[in-house]
């Protein structure tokens, strides 16, 4: 059982890494800051490639989230109990998935949303992403402290 | 005659635009502000065979849009790292042989054989106003927008000048001016580099029910504007009449700028000057299509998640037995 949970966290980890990387690549920063000059990372400056990557990992992420939820509902495993940290994570994930899905709809032909709504989606998506990153750092520090204190 | 029909139809279209503006202004429904009703976009037809290269359209565009041009103040803030290019066109405002932040339309020249006779062709070039514009859809801040009538434009108050729109535009249309815009108020050394400029299809004139300046000024009636389906119909009739060719109908999945030429576009493409600020006439695949196809395919991901959990549940139930 323990091993399976590890595979799941491993998949979450890989997905987070690539989804964040390809997400940041949507802003024109990797070329400016020489990151795409590093041999083998040239693709980070190709907006179309990173856009596709972001979509693919978003799909995998949603699959993983649905799997975790189904597990929780059916087997009552995965989440031991709904802790405060868990609730924060659920809010952030829901925000990311909702804003991201609406942005995917926006990218189809036509103008389904007003420009104000598009701007709000762009900003909210990046805010949820920053919240997740900060929360991740907070959890790391917390875990380290717990380990140190025994 | 055809121009008249299109003008009437165009005015009809602009009434719909005015109507929608009035509806949202009175706040008729919040839903309409978020979910827009589908309206037929406007398109322009450019008959290359008629253009005499007088550049009246170019000057009309400059005059009509002069108050939208940037007035950057020097010295420009130092940018980090050093490789970030300063793009300054403020002292070269009279350049008309390419696109610049101060020139959103230029005339391209090509020599080609028309009916066995060598002829110099002149072609007005500007933003194509794509049906699904990557410059708009991939802008990270929503600074570029597409309006219901199909035009796309960049909001100079919001643009940070990162030039992503130019990189993703199949024709490299938007042009940057450093030292102006919102980035100056944020972190000018670290992010942003000015504002991107391009043809906005004279959105302000269209809102008033008027025709874009370049169309109005042309002495040869090279351009016609109207609902896209009518413009396409006219373009096909014209191409048939002159035994000519069409560009812009399918490029990048479809655009609102339909060129009709007496010579094939690959021949024109071989004869025109191409480079920064000078657009090509190559075939262009639909740039947004792969992402959108993946998005459709990804709908399966949540189902896969449920299936995986169901598999696990089934296995656990079996083990319990
Ligand atoms: S031609 Fe380029 S700038 Fe114009 S709408 Fe298409 S992608 Fe945008
Ligand atoms: S439509 Fe307006 S902005 Fe665009 S090229 Fe013509 S005059 Fe210039
Ligand atoms: S004004 Fe008309 S004829 Fe003159 S260059 Fe422009 S499109 Fe051609």
Image (cartoon, helix red, strand yellow):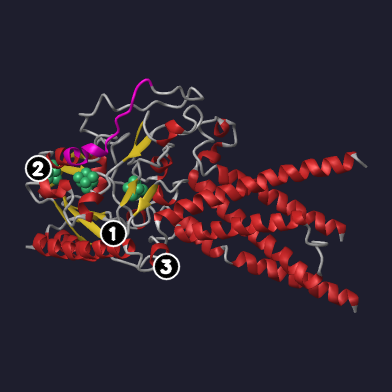
- Which mark, by number, is residue B149? 1
Q: Output the chain of dot 3.
A: B
Stretch in magenta = B62-75
Q: Is mark 3 within 8 Å of ligand 1?
A: no
B227 above or below A36? below
Q: Residue at x 39, y 63 (%)?
A: B33
Q: Output the chain of dot 2.
A: B
Instruction: Provide the secondary structure element on which disc 2 rests.
Output: loop
Where residue B85 appears, x then y in whole percent? 42, 26
Q: Is residue B202 rendered to the left or right of residue A82?
A: left
Q: Find disc 3 in the rendering and name its residue.
A: B31
Where residue B284 appears, x then y in whole percent? 36, 50
Q: Find disc 2 in the rendering and name its residue.
A: B52
Instruction: Provide the secondary structure element on which disc 3 rests.
Output: helix
Q: Residue at x 21, y 61 (%)?
A: B14
Quarter occupied by the N terminus of chain B: bottom left
Neighbourhood count class around disc 2 (C-alpha, 10 Å): few under 14, some 14–19, many 20 upward:
some
Quarter occupied by the C terminus of chain B: bottom right
Q: CA distance from mark 2 to mark 1?
A: 29 Å
Where residue B148 appears, x then y in whole percent? 32, 60
Q: Is residue A8 rendered to the left or right of residue A36?
A: right
Does the segment drawn in magenta span residue B64?
yes
Where residue B142 appears, x then y in whole percent? 43, 48
């Amino acid at each position: 059982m323990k091993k399976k949970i590890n595979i799941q966290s491993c998949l979450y980890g890989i997905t987070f890494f690539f989804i964040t990387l390809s997400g940041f690549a949507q802003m024109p920063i990797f070329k400016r800051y020489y990151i795409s000059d590093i041999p083998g990372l040239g693709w980070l400056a190709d907006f179309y490639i990173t856009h596709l990557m972001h979509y693919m990992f978003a799909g995998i992420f949603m699959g993983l989230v649905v799997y975790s939820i189904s597990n929780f509902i059916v087997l009552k495993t995965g989440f031991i109990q709904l802790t405060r940290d868990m609730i924060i994570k659920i809010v952030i994930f829901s925000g990311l998935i909702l804003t991201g899905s609406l942005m995917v709809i926006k990218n189809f032909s036509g103008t389904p949303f007003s420009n104000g709504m598009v701007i709000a989606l762009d900003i909210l998506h990046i805010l949820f992403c920053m919240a997740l990153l900060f929360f991740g750092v907070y959890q790391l520090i917390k875990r380290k402290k717990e380990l140190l204190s025994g | 005659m055809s121009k008249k029909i299109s003008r009437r139809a165009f005015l009809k279209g602009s009434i719909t635009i005015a109507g929608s503006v009035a509806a949202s202004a009175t706040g008729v429904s919040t839903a309409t502000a978020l979910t827009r009703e589908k309206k037929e976009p406007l398109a322009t037809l450019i008959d290359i065979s008629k253009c005499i290269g007088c550049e009246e359209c170019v000057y009309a565009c400059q005059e009509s849009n002069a108050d939208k041009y940037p007035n950057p103040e020097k010295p420009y803030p130092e940018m980090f790292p050093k490789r970030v290019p300063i793009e300054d066109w403020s002292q070269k405002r009279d350049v008309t042989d390419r696109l610049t932040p101060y020139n959103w339309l230029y005339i391209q020249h090509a020599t080609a054989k028309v009916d066995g006779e060598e002829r110099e062709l002149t072609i007005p070039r500007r933003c194509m106003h794509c049906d699904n514009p990557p410059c708009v859809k991939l802008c990270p801040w929503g600074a570029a927008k597409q309006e219901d009538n199909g035009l796309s434009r960049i909001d100079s108050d919001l643009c940070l000048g990162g030039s992503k729109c130019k990189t993703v535009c199949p024709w490299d249309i938007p042009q940057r001016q450093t030292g102006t815009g919102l980035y100056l108020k944020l972190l000018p050394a670290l992010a942003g580099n000015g504002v991107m400029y391009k043809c906005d299809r004279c959105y302000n004139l269209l809102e008033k029910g008027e025709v874009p300046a370049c169309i109005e000024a042309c002495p040869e009636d090279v351009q016609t504007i109207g609902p896209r389906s009518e413009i396409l119909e006219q373009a096909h009739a014209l191409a048939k009449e002159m035994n000519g060719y069409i560009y812009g109908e399918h490029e990048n999945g479809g655009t609102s700028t339909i060129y009709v030429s007496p010579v094939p576009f690959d021949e024109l493409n071989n004869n025109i000057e191409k480079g920064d600020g000078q657009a090509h006439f190559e075939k262009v695949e639909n740039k947004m299509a792969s992402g959108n196809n993946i998005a459709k395919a990804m709908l399966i991901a949540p189902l896969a998640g449920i299936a995986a959990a169901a598999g696990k549940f089934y296995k656990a139930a079996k083990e319990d037995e």
